[in-house]
Image: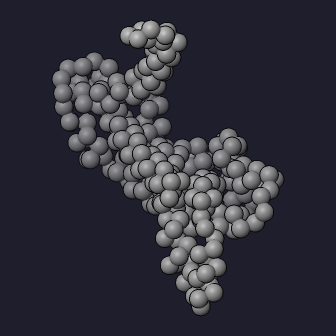
Amino acid sequence: MPSGRRDPAGLLLGAHLRLVYLFLYLPIAVLMVLSFNNAGMPTAWTGFSLRWYGALAESGPILKAALNTLIVATLSTAIATTLGTLLALGVERRRRSGLLDALLFAPMIIPDIVLAIALLSFFTLLQFTLGLHSIILSHAVFNIAFVCAVVRTRLRHFDWSIVEASIDLGAGEITTFRRVTLPAIFPGVLAGALLAFTLSVDEFIIAFFTAGAGQSSTTLPMQIYSMIRFGVTPEINAMATIVMLLSFTLVFLAQRAQREAVTG
């Protein structure tokens, strides 16, 4: 192709890529801009203002829901990260099995509503009281598979001979795990934990089904849903903006940690 001329196919693909990004992110950008709108109507711009973020800070139900979300995300992430890491270590030491991988990835593939109904039925069968604790356990079950998948990515590049060398030199299994294995796979563990935290913060369906009744177990996505049924308000735009910025930040950090886990 002569110098100075651009490939028409490349131009078309570039234009298509820009349209896709525009389609995906323009609604989000509009929502974020409207969260700084001074008007009480969420779609009529009258000037820049931070009043709706101040209104969020003074809203008791929203602050309570945010605290519940933070508790659920933190505790479920701790449980899922611990169990998911141990599961990944156990699976990688075994011979590869397509059936085992399918069972591990099932919670990631099946629809959330199916998993939510299954968890609700299980809790009902055990006569387990619903509340914030049931959401924590449900989110942990949902996130274990994601943590396991991320940690297994790091373990595929892990040199198991250093574990055997540590044991041969007299270190116990717990000491070997704490001083050899865990530091080596920590980027993968961190990436899995950040991903689990992000998914827990954003998750709605499983929390909605397993929360039980009452404001005491309402998470932030549930609070947004209860508010949006009466129409989109500037407070909802502001709250959605904060949640999206938090989610984007955590996803970015998880991707950075996972990239470091893959490259070693």
Viewed as shown, does residue 17 lie left or right of 127? left
- Image coordinates for residue 258, horizontal then vertical, percent: 50, 52
Viewed as shown, does residue 50 lie left or right of 167? left
Residue 147 figure quarter: bottom right
Residue 34 figure quarter: top left
Front residue of 45 and 83: 83
- Image coordinates for residue 77, horizontal then vertical, percent: 51, 60
Residue occupying image coordinates x 21% and y 36%: 51
- Asked whether residue 261 is in view, the answer is yes
Residue occupying image coordinates x 65% and y 47%: 108
Viewed as shown, does residue 69 lie left or right of 95? left
Front residue of 175 and 9: 9
Residue occupying image coordinates x 24% and y 27%: 37
Q: Residue furthest front?
A: 2
Answer above or below: position of 128 versus 35: below
Answer above or below: position of 209 versus 162: above
